[in-house]
Image (cartoon, helix red, strand yellow):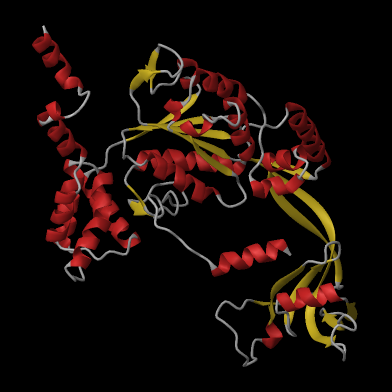
Amino acid sequence: MVELKVSESRDLTRIERIGAHSHIRGLGLDSALEPRASSEGMVGQTTARKAAGVIVQMVKEGKIAGRAVLLAGQPGTGKTAIAMGMAKSIGLETPFAMLAGSELFSLEMSKTEALMQAFRKAIGVRIKEETEVIEGEVVEIQIDRPAVTGAASKTGKLTLKTTEMETVYDLGAKMIEALGKDKVQSGDVIAIDKASGKITKLGRSFSRSRDYDAMGPQTKFVQCPDGELQKRKEVVHCVTLHEIDVINSRTQGFLALFTGDTGEIRAEVREQIDTKVAEWREEGKAEIVPGVLFIDEVHMLDIECFSFLNRALENDMAPILVVATNRGITTIRGTNYKSPHGIPIDFLDRLLIISTQPYTEEDIRKILDIRCQEEDVDVSEDAKVLLTKIGVDTSLRYAINLITSAALACQKRKGKVVEMEDVSRAYELFWDVKRSTQYLIEYQRDYMFSEGTMGEEDEMVS
């Protein structure tokens, strides 16, 4: 019952906000893993996208675990966009967990526990079980309502048929309610799970395709099932190891998944779960689906986190780890030592490094075109040329931020299409990093604790 309510509310309140990477639909690769110039929201970065495609292929095959990949490049070169593309390309059944490096530093749980939970979220278990299912085409539904309200519960009969047989089933109040909720009518092909009583609407029978009753364009027509009404079917459930951990570690059981109150999970619980999953694998009941764990801003992790990752990657159950950073040679957090990307050499040695390059002027133009479509803003050709020039001189992110600002300036003057004057207006109102830095250098005396004024003040004092 709860599941039905959740799915209904999703259909009714389908709100999609435009985000920084909402235009990304995949990696934009063809069947031979060759990157297209512009596809699925991805532009340029052909080498990096091709390498990411190879990683996705490894994940889909599910044979390799514990590999680690580093996306390294300057700010605004599409590292997170490639990670989002990977997530979309992998598919629904393969788990993809995403977090930022700073998320691990919380007062509620230790860093290693937060990392372990992230690892377990990226490992799926495909559990197979056989269930008894009644599957057939609805011939007739008869519901007998009591003459006096509240005197007795509703009763009824359901007639189901396949190509070979037809049977009448007696219905109780709960089944009548479920049939009413799913709007099941004669001509529908349904499946009823005998254990739980859950009704699944498979579609409408082809024999009713000529009916002239009101049917939407989404109506799916299926063949009338053949053979016997009652069948044994294999049902596959996909869950992550973290979900199994949560259900087994708390007194409130599966409700902890909804409340979010997971806390630290004891090592004994995890060991028992790993043993049970291993038993299921041997019996053929379960299959491990190694997914992807993406950690953005990996330079924010400290030396303890890196040593944990070193050990965790050697485990057979480890997912494929993808990390991203925009740092050069910098200090490893928690030490006084400097290292490339702020990552210790022993961990860096395990990584396959994918480098992202700065976008060309043509790439920036294409990305701005895609973002204008995504944000539903009509921009004139001259304004797009100006936005591209601003993107080349300042940064791509700044140019993207100007799109909506310019659209609001256009709206204020009651225009329909964003022109150069609207982009110029937004450019004057909102500064980029270069102009802001220039202003600070010129007027640093008027600011408190400015490092540029320290030497001069000391001279004046002396």
Is 242 situated above or below 141?
A: above
Q: Which of the 4 image quadrants contains residue 60?
A: top right
- For residue 440, side relative to residue 254 (left or right): left
**Residue 441 percent coordinates (x, y):** 13, 29
> In the rendered view of the protein, which quadrant contains the C terminus?
top left
User: In this orientation, does residue 64 appear?
Assistant: no
Residue at left offset 83%, top offset 72% = 174
Please tell me which residue lies in front, 379 or 265: 265
Residue 132 lies, in percent from the top left, at 86, 63
Residue pictured at 30% horizontal, 36% vertical: 357
Q: How many marks?
A: 0
Q: Which residue is more in the foreground, 162 or 446?
A: 446
- View extreme (front): residue: 461
Q: Quadrant of residue 207?
A: bottom right
Residue 240 visible to the viewer: yes
Find residue 349 and report its horizontal and vertical position in percent. Answer: 48, 19
Image position, residue 457 (x, y; %): 13, 15
Q: Is residue 350 left or right of residue 268?
A: left
Locate the N terminus by quadrant: bottom right
Q: Residue at point 54% right, 31% down? A: 106
Q: Is residue 13 above or below residue 210?
A: above
Q: Camera-side residue: 422 or 287? A: 422
Q: Nearer the viewer, residue 261 or 8?
A: 261
Quadrant in the picture for residue 142: bottom right
